[in-house]
Image (cartoon, rainbow, N blue to C red):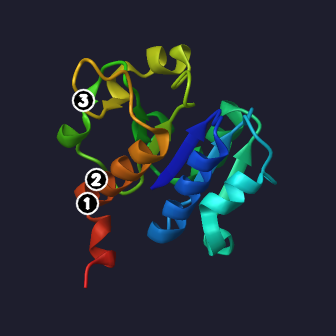
Amino acid sequence: MDLVIVHPEIPQNTGTSARLAAAIDLPLHLVEPLGFSLDSKYLKRAGLDYWPDVEMHVHADWTSLESTLAPASPRAFEERLRLFTARGGTSLFDVDFEEDDILVFGSESQGLPGALLEAHMDRRVRVPTLDSVRSLNLANVVCLGAYVALDRSGGIAKFQA
């Protein structure tokens, strides 16, 4: 399983997601452009002292990400995508996740690019909320999505005593 954030804007959210990636041993992929420098003190502070444990990859664009992740599994790249969005899709709690899924999250202000969502309508995942709530914090959705996906795919067992 891989975590992907497309065009992240807030270093604290990315740092928090990186700390989560270290805690659950999942690679974190960032798709440029980034809204901050990787040297940001806010990014580093949110990740605390876990940075040596983070497997982080930065990709120039979506095509670069796809070239890196497509050969990693016998399943087709498109079949592995789980696009988290506030714009419809299957409830997070109704998705049958698989261990080689790619969990994809968008930027804080724009979410995922519309063209990406349009191209993969059946791969959209949403976290249910009240209609009056526009969206949730990116780091919270990454955390919730990763843990539910690990639980549903059987990957959470390695963390249970």
For disc 2, the marked residue is: 148
Front residue of this view, candidates 70 and 26:
26
Residue type at mark 1 is Asp
Q: Quadrant of residue 9?
A: top right
Q: Quadrant of the N terminus?
A: bottom left
Asked which secondary structure carries label 3, the reply is: loop
Badge 2 vs badge 1, beta-carbon distance below 8 Å: yes
Location of the C terminus (image quadrant): bottom left
Say few, some or many: other residues with alpha carbon within 10 Å of mark 1 (under 14 / 14 to 19 / 20 or more).
Answer: some
Residue at image x 72%, y 47%? 58
**For mark 1, what is the residue?**
151
- Tell me what residue is drawn at x 37 percent, y 24 percent: 86
Q: Nearer the viewer, residue 115 or 91?
A: 91
Determine the secondary structure under disc 1: helix
* Alpha-carbon span between mark 1 and mark 3: 21 Å
Label ID, residue 129: 3
- The image quadrant that residue 108 belongs to is top right
Q: How many discs appear?
A: 3
Of 26 and 45, which appears nearest the observer?
Answer: 45
- Where residue 94 sits in the image (x, y, percent)? 18, 38
Return the x and y of residue 49 as percentages of the image width and height.
Answer: 65, 74
The vertical placement of 7 against 69, above or below, is above
Q: Quadrant of residue 35?
A: top right
Q: Earlier in the sequence, mark 1 or mark 3?
A: 3
Mark 2–mark 3 Cα distance, whole angstroms, equals 16 Å
Residue type (three-letter) at the residue carrying disc 2: Val
Q: Is residue 114 above or below residue 17?
A: above
Of tags 2 and 3, the one toward the viewer is 3
Disc 2 crowd rating (10 Å Cα; few below 14, some 14-19, many 20+) is: some
Q: Marks 2 and 1, Cα distance to the nearest angstrom?
A: 5 Å
At which x and y percent is residue 18? 58, 58
